[in-house]
Amino acid sequence: MVENNRRKFLKVVSHSLGGVLAAGIAAPLVGLGIHPWLKETVYGTEEFINLGKLEDFPVGIPKKMNVTSSKMDAWNVFEGLVMGSVWVLRKEDDSLKVFSVNCPHLGCGINWGEDEKQFLCPCHEGVFDINGKVLSGPAPRSLYSYETKIENDNVLVNYKKLI
Amino acid sequence: MANKLGEWIEDRTGLSKLLKAALDEPVHGGAKWSYIFGSGLVFLFVLQAVTGIFMASYYSPSSTAAWGSVYYLQYKTSFGWFVRGVHHYGSSAMMIVAMVHMFQVFIFGAYKKPRELNWISGVILLLFLAGFGLTGYLLPWDQKGYWATQVATNIMGTVPVIGKYIKILHLGGADYGNFTITRFYTLHVFLLPISLVFFLFIHIALFRKHGVTPYWKMREEVLRDRIDPFWPDQIFKDIVFALGMYAVIAGVVFWTRGAELQSPADPASNYLARPEWYFLFLFELLKYCQGKYLIVGTVIIPALALIFLFVLPFIDRNTSRYPSKRIPYFGAVFSGLTGAVVLTVLAMHHDSKDIHIIHQREEAEKQAARAVKLAEKGIPPTGGLSIFLHDPIALGEKIFKESCIGCHKVGAEGGDNGPDFTNFGSREWIAGLLKNPKDAKYFKETGAMPPIKLPDESLMDMAEFLLSQSAGLIHQNAERVERGKELVLKGNCVVCHPIGNKDLKKIAPNLTEYLSETWLKEFIRNPGDPKFYGTRNKMPAFDKLTGNQLDALIQYIISLSKDRTLVSEKQEKGKRGYVFGLTSPRTMITFQDKS
C-alpha cells in the first residue's frame, strides 16, 4: 500500500517534471519557428525608388520603366535587382501618374497602343484610357497605380504599395 | 468520448500495450541513481535532434551562404541564439555524459560476458559522437571551424595509402569549397544521425535483453528479490537528471551569451586553429609526434586505443566484476584517461600562456564584432567574407599600416617616434597622457606639457569631459563630465590650450571637440597649424589623402578605442537595450524613441 502510494506520487511528480522540461525545450523552439510571423524576411530596402530624371519622360506619352532596387533576402542583400516595371505618364502640369503594368482583370501585362492612344490588354481585350480608366473589356476597375513624388527633379515611386 | 476514441485507436494499433511493454521493464536490484547516464544520453540526443532540426530550417549549406545564414539565426531571429547555444553546449554535455557512462560501465564491469556486444555498440556510438562534433564544427563556416577542420582533414590525409583518397572524398575535392560543406552537412544531419539511431536501437535492445549491471557488491538475493518497475521508479530519476542537465546547459548558454560565431572563414588568413575541447588531447599529442613520427600521433596511438576498447570484453574474461580482480585493465584504462586529461590540460595551459594565441583571440573577437556590424546591412551574394571588401575600417587600417605605423605603435607592432596608439583616444589613454606626457607611451622627452599632479580619479574625470565634447563616447557619465569640466576650465589647462572656440590659437593644441572626427581630420591634414602644434610640430602633414581615405583612416583610429563608437554608425534618437529571447544578448537592439 505504502509502495503503491509512493509510486502514484512518483508518477505525478514525473509527469509534472517531464511537462516542465518539455515546455522549457519547446518554448524557445516555437519562438524560433514563428520568426517569419514576427519579422519581414524578404523586402526591398528602398521605400521610394528612383525611376530617372523628370525631363527623361515625354509629356503626354506613357513610358515603360524598369524598377530597380536592392532587396534584402534574409541575410543577403541583392543590389540593383529588377523588381518589375511600371508605366509612367507625365502630364502637362508635370504631375505624374505611375501605373502598374498588370491588368486589374487577371494580371496580364498591358501595352500602350501608340495609334489608339489607349492601354491595351492582349489577353481579354481590355482597353483603358491614358488615365487608366476602363473603356471596355472585362476589367473590374481602373489600372492600379503607385504613389509617386518628384524630388530634386527625380521621379520616385513607392513600389511597395498599389493604389 | 475521449475514452471511445482511445479504445478505437487501441483496437487498431495496440499502442498502450506497446507502451506498457516499453515501460514495464523490471529493474532487478531496484532503481538506482547510478543508472541515469544511459537515458541521460538518449535525452541529450533527442535535444540535439530537435534543436538541430529547427536550426536546419535557417541554415544554408554553401560556402557563400553558410556564415550568413548562421549569422541570421544568431542575431536576427528570436531565440535563435539560444537554440544554437543549447545545441553547441549540448554537444559538449553529450561528450561528458558519454565519458561518464563509459567509465561507469567499465568500472562496474558491465562489458563482460554476455554483454560484449553492448560494449562494442557503445564504442561505435562514441565514435559517431566524435563524428558529430567534427562535422558540426565546420558548418558555420567561420574562422574557428574552418581552420580547426583543416587540421582534422589533414590528419585524415596522413593515413598511409588510402589517406589521400579518404580526404578528397570528405572534402568533395582537392580543396575546401561548396562540396566540403554539403558533405559535412550530409554527414552531420543525415548519415550520422541515421547510423547513430540504428546502433542506439541495437544498444538499447541488448541492454533490455541483459538488464542492468548493478554495483558489484550487491548480494545475489537482493538482485533476485528486489524488483522495481522501470516506470515510474527509474524514469523519475532519469527525468530529474534530464531536467538538471537542461537547466545547466541553459544556464551556460545564458552565462556565455550563446555559442560564439567568429568572422567568416578567410582562406588567406593565418589563423591558429584549435579544435573543440574534447579533441584537444589528440591535437596536443601531435606536438610530440613530429616529422616521420607524425603518423604515430595521427593514426597509430588512436588506432591502438580504439582496438583496445573493441577487444576489451574478449581479453578481460575473468567473470569477477570486483575492481581488485581487474587491476591490469584498470591500470590500462585509467592511464589512458590520465594521459588524455594531462594532454588536454597541457594544451590549455600552453594556449593560455601563448601570446600569439591570446592576441589572436582578442583580434578574432574584434573581427567577429565588426563582421556582425557589417552584416547588419546585408551580406552580398558573393559570400560572408565580402562584407569586409567595402569596410572603411579595413581600408583605414591599410592606410594606417602604410602611412602611420612607422611612428605610431598599435599593440606590439609599429615604431615609437610618436605616441603609442594602442587603445588610442580611450579614457585610459587620455588620463595616462595627462598624468605624464613625457612617458615613453606618449611624447617622451619632447613633451612640453607638465604632468598634471592630480589623483587618478580626477584625471579620469578630465578625460571624460574632453571626450564628451564629441559624440560617440560609450557610457558617458554626466557627473564625471561636470567634475572634469570644472577641472579643465578652472585649472591651468586653459592657460596654454584654447577650448570652447574652434578657431582660437594659443601655444598648445586647441581642445575644442578634442579627438572628434572633424578635429582628427583637420589635425591629420595639417598638424603644424597654429591651432594645433604650430612650430613645435614634428608630424608630417597628410594632406594628400583623399576624402574617402581620410574618412576611412579616422574610422580606423576611432575603432582603436574601446570607449568610443563612430558617430556615423551610431543610431540616433534610439534607446539601446536587450529584450530576453528576442535577440542575441551579444548584440543590443535599437528601439525607436517615440518621444
Image: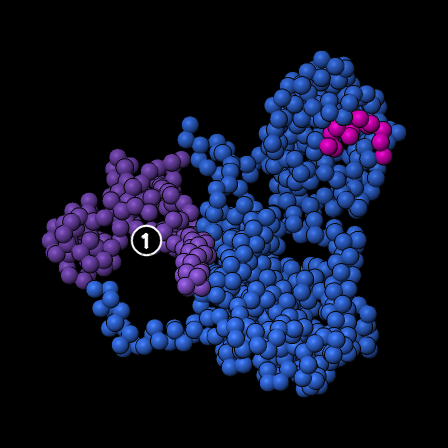
Chain colours: A purple, B blue
Residue that appears at 41% across and 63% down: A1
Residue that appears at 48% across and 42% down: B579
Q: Amino acid at mark 1?
A: Ser
Q: Inspect the magenta stretch and tell me whether residue B434 lies in it.
A: yes
Residue that appears at 51% across and 38% down: B577
In the displayed structure image, the side of residue A101 where residue B347 appears, left or right: right
Quadrant for the C terminus of chain B in the image: top left
The magenta stretch is: B428-440
Which image quarter: residue B538?
top right
User: Which chain does the residue under circle 1 lie in?
Assistant: A
Q: Which of these two is toward me, B78 or B150?
A: B78
Q: Is residue B567 above or below residue B334?
A: above
Q: Which residue is mark 1?
A: A85
Q: Inspect the magenta stretch and tell me whether residue B571 lies in it.
A: no
Image position, residue B266 (x, y; %): 64, 59
Image position, residue A29 (x, y; %): 44, 56
Callout 1: SS: strand
Query: Dominant secondary structure of the magenta stretch?
Result: helix
Which image quarter: residue A98?
top left
The outermost residue toward the right is B445
Q: Is residue B560 above or below residue B448?
A: below
Instruction: Estimate how packed mark 1 is, as few (under 14), some (14 to 19) or many (20 or more) residues with alpha carbons within 10 Å.
Output: some
Q: Which of these two is toward me, B363 or A4?
A: A4
Q: Is residue B462 above or below residue B273?
A: above
Image position, residue B111 (x, y; %): 63, 80
